[in-house]
Amino acid sequence: MRKMKKIAAVSMAAIMMLSACGCSGKKNDSKKTASETDAVTEDLGPAPVIEDNEEWVTTEEPYIEDDRFTTVEGADVLGINFDDGDTAGFTTYVNGGDYLLYVEDGELVADIAKTGTLEHSCQLYYDGFTMARGCVYTVSFDVHSDVPCNLEWRVQVNGGDYHAYASDKVAVTSEVQTIDYEFTMDEDSDPAPRLAINMGAFDENGGDPGAHKIYFDNFSLFVTDSSNAEKIVGAPTPIQVKVNQIGYEPDDYKTVIVTSKDEEKFKIVDAETGDTVYIGEYGDMAFDSTVNLGVKQGDFSDFKYTGKYKIISSPSGESYDFEIGYNLYDDIYKDVILMLYKQRCGCEVTEDIAGDFAHEACHTENAIVYGSSSSSTVDVSGGWHDAGDYGRYVVSGAKTVQDLLLTYEDFDISADDIGIPESGNGIPDLLDEAKYELDWMLKMQDSASGGVYHKVTALVFPETVLAVDETDQLVLAPVSYAATGDFAAVMAKASVIYAEYDKDFAANCLAAAENAYAYLEANEGMKGYKNPEEIVTGEYPDNQLADEKLWAASELYIATKDSKYLDVVNEMVNSRPDTNLGWAGIGGYALYDLAKADDIDAGAKESATAALLEAADKLIAKCKKEPFFMGLGTNYPWGSNMSIANNGMLLLMANKISPNEEYAEYAQRHRDYIFGVNGTGYCYVTGYGDLSPEHTHHRPSQVLGETMPGMLVGGPDNALEDPYAKAVLHGYAPALAYVDNEQSFSCNEVTIYWNSPLIYLMGGFQ
Ligand code: G3I
Ligand code: 9MR
Ligand code: ZN
């Protein structure tokens, strides 16, 4: 389907060195012998300048702003009436209030049974319009009520602190009044604001007006004067020439990808001088359905000189700068690990490590058990904040811990100088960091039953506040089978790994794992976790629970060699087990640890190995069909960057149990995707590269007005799962459905378990 420069095959010895010595010597290199431990090409130094008499034109700007949103004077950006009999996109929100919304005789009716105690206890809102800085608007609508009452209308930012761009209170009576309010938008243009009407408790109401109805019609937002209106930018048009912005080792595969229909050629130039150092050729064009564009690949793997470069692609433009060299990932790797330290809960996070993100101990108060009649509370302090919220969830925590333990095990990463408080204590930092979560997880177990509480959060997501300022009552959500299974698995694995460093801790972990397993046995057939109605924080729902059972049984079998676990493993391992490495599907972890274990039942080991390699081979087959080398097809789900990192991880695992050049090659391509060889061209880790996310949905970053470095964002989500994404990414191709905006929690949040597979993937190349 496309022509690529041939990459010569490599000796098996070099491939094995990828995992054995942590270096990525892969392609043929005449200077290398199989017995050498250092498979890296010698440093060739800076590239010599070459003669370049060709003509290079770059006609397109490297960065084009989105111009879908215009401001036409006189236009009505809302223009809503209710003549069609439906609520025309207006939606209800209640927080302690109770009301119905319907249309009657061409008017929108808010039929309020209970006003609640907050202004927004009863709210109605409308999304799906745009507002430009400098533009003068007039809000207009008709309103009346059956009982005199007060309300407040607001055009506001839709997320964060929900502050208003303009708002006013209105005393409503049975007389129809027409609101007309002119204002200038003097904040940044917003492609996804919200019109909200609060109808809850107002001082002016002098108490509760009781049950009442409010009638609305003819909502308008007129563009009154657009002479000073600025252009509204949604998601920017992606750069066309994509490279890994962090860079490559000399021996790495190196492919520039350009989205272009034209005759296209590329050269590498010195980033500082602009001197030409390499002239390359693209392969044939292929249509790529992840970006809905024609795409060409240009291989420059044979260019091995160290230095700082960029690519000029004629006529599509320039790439961001990138380096070829050694140790390019040292800083970012540390920061991606330190993100976990900065997410620590229940302890002081110190300034010398976390800088502006330092804080006093947060969430230290005890939690109540949801639904329990007793007033006793439980100490569940500790662990990591999951993400941009401050919830602590067992299933996502278990995945994160497992990724750290595997990184330590597989790549022999015993570094004790990452820069966490425990550094220098003689225990590898990856294990110290993982133990911070394991200690918390132990508190999440109900020791009587062995069951593990699904999560601890307040009843609702926190406002956009710092961790120490979320002081709502903490609640332990009900025990779940998934949390208990994942807990049993990582505790059993921890009992093996920590035995060398801390015998007592290892023994505690094993006892806790066995207790949790007993809960699983006693509760077969239990349904997947669902949030009780009052708890609206992250759900992590999962109805497929066989993989959790398999994982728990596998790790307990490896830890104890008890045949009772082997029986379960044997029963499940041959029945097409799930091979994922996510927070829901986690079967891949079971298979991998079985495939890796030395002294276990040969049949179980063989079946696990076969299943895992089959998954890796299927993935490679898919990757080969996609011009960006990924195998997700057109399904970019919430947290697609985790899917990518997990897939890269799977390939390194496959390479570990059955060394194969292609596994290593495609694992590296997954790494390169994360750092820029992707549809949008972003380096998806904050703080690194020329273009990386700056407005993450991460409460500490939002409050401080700066994004914490070292965080992998969720990335493209073509299901458009938040209002901002719905507004600005409508119609976008799957791998382009990403926007760097803090309101877009489905694209631009961060999590511990998105960083952790990246830690493994980068660990494989460290
Ligand atoms: O599995 C299906 C797939 O079959 C389907 O093709 C695809 C279509 O888009 O959807 C997939 O399911 C998605 C699922 O994630 C698995 O990727 C759901 O649509 C999507 O809604 C779901 O999103 C999850 C989100 O919570 C909402 O539940 C994210 O994975 C999960 O990472 C996220 O987790 C939140 C926590 O609740 C709270 N803390 C922050 C964290 C990150 O945003
Ligand atoms: O901020 C929340 C984020 O951390 C979660 O991952 C996300 C998904 O459940 O939800 C976010 O909270 C949003 C909520 O779901 C809906 N109202 C707006 C909230 C964000 O401002
Ligand atoms: Zn906390």
Image (cartoon, rainbow, N blue to C red):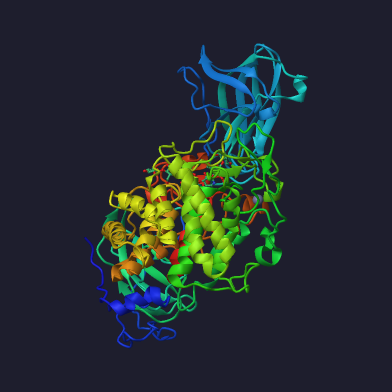
Locate residue 440, reporting x and y percent: 60, 53
At x 45%, y 38%, the residue is 528
At x 42%, y 59%, the residue is 645
Instruction: Decide if residue 729 is in sight here.
Output: no
Locate residue 424, reporting x and y percent: 63, 74
Q: Where is the N terminus found, in terms of image quarters?
A: bottom left
Q: Taking 450 as reference, is 240 above or below it? A: below
In the image shown, does 617 or 221 lie closer to the viewer? 617
- Among all residues in the image, which is located at the extreme front? 563
Instruction: Decide if residue 123 is in sight here.
Output: yes
Query: Left of 487 or right of it: where is 377?
Result: right
Total marks shown come to: 0
In the image shown, does 3 or 376 lie closer to the viewer? 376
Q: Taking 184 as reference, is 119 above or below it? A: above
Q: Quadrant of residue 348?
A: bottom right
Q: Quadrant of residue 160?
A: top right
- Among all residues in the image, which is located at the extreme left? 1
Locate residue 34, reporting x and y percent: 31, 84
In the image shown, does 312 or 676 lie closer to the viewer? 676
Q: Taking 626 as reference, is 27 above or below it? A: below
At x 36%, y 71%, the residue is 254
Locate residue 309, reporting x and y percent: 44, 75
In the image shown, does 541 or 610 lie closer to the viewer? 610
- Among all residues in the image, which is located at the extreme bottom? 31
Q: Quadrant of residue 52?
A: bottom left
Query: Left of 38 or right of it: where is 162?
Result: right
Query: Left of 731 or right of it: where is 283?
Result: left
